[in-house]
Image (spheres, rainbow, N blue to C red):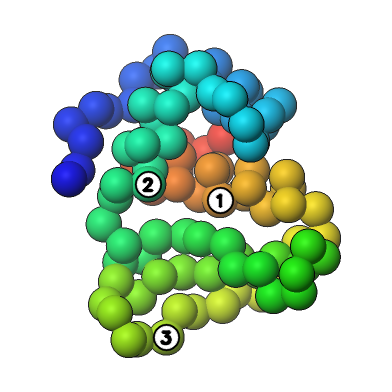
Amino acid sequence: MASHYKIRAEDWVYAEEFRANPTGHHSPGLQRILTLFRTAPLKGKHLLLETKPYREWRLAVHPGERGKPITLLDKVYRDPRDAEWDVFRLRWKAHTGEDLD
């Protein structure tokens, strides 16, 4: 089920909240944005793959169809917080057309 919520200019405060705390409890406003990101169509969606348990994550793109291979990108992370932030930024751009600095 796709969300009808659209990110507004004042929602940038939730990006700051996510960057400070990518896991754990989130405010209702941030949860609304995360739900929007998570319910978007799979095709072209950025995601993380844990390539070495608890030590390495890779940025990837979902093909949108079951059984098709996920495309691994060159970006490798050692810190999961950095990885989560980059996925959040990419999804933000996909929904708003704007970059988060």
Mark 1 and mark 2 lie on one chain; the one further toward the N terminus is 2
**Which residue is the site of mark 3?**
69
74 relative position to 52: left or right = left
Circle 1 — which element? helix
Residue linked to disc 1: 87
Query: From the viewer's perspective, is residue 37 above or below residue 69?
Result: above
**Horizontal and vertical percent for residue 14?**
52, 21
Q: Amino acid at mark 3?
A: Pro
**Image quadrant assignment for residue 63:** bottom left
Dots 2, 3 in contact, CB < 8 A: no
Considering the numbered disc 3 on the image, is that residue within a helix, a strand or a loop? loop
Circle nearer the N terminus (2, 3): 2
Q: Residue at x 76, y 74 (%)?
A: 52
Q: CA distance from mark 3 to mark 1?
A: 19 Å
Amino acid bearing label 1: Val
Q: Are marks 3 and 1 in contact (CB under 8 Å)?
A: no
Contact between labelled residues 2 and 1, with CB atoms less than 8 Å apart: no
Residue 97 seen in the current view: no
The image position of residue 38, as x and y in percent, is: 37, 47
Residue name at image x 45 percent, y 79 percent: 70
The label number, if any, that marks residue 38 in the structure image? 2
Q: Position of residue 80 (x, y in %)?
A: 73, 52
x 49%, y 79%: residue:
71
| Residue situated in front as seen by the camera: 21 or 54 | 54
What residue appears at the point 63 percent right and 36 percent down from the top-left corner? 23
Residue 85 in view (yes/no): yes
The residue nearer to you, when weighing 49 against 71, is 49
From the image, state whether disc 1 or disc 2 is nearer to you.
2
Q: Quadrant of the N terminus?
A: top left
* Mark 3 / mark 1, whichever is N-terminal: 3
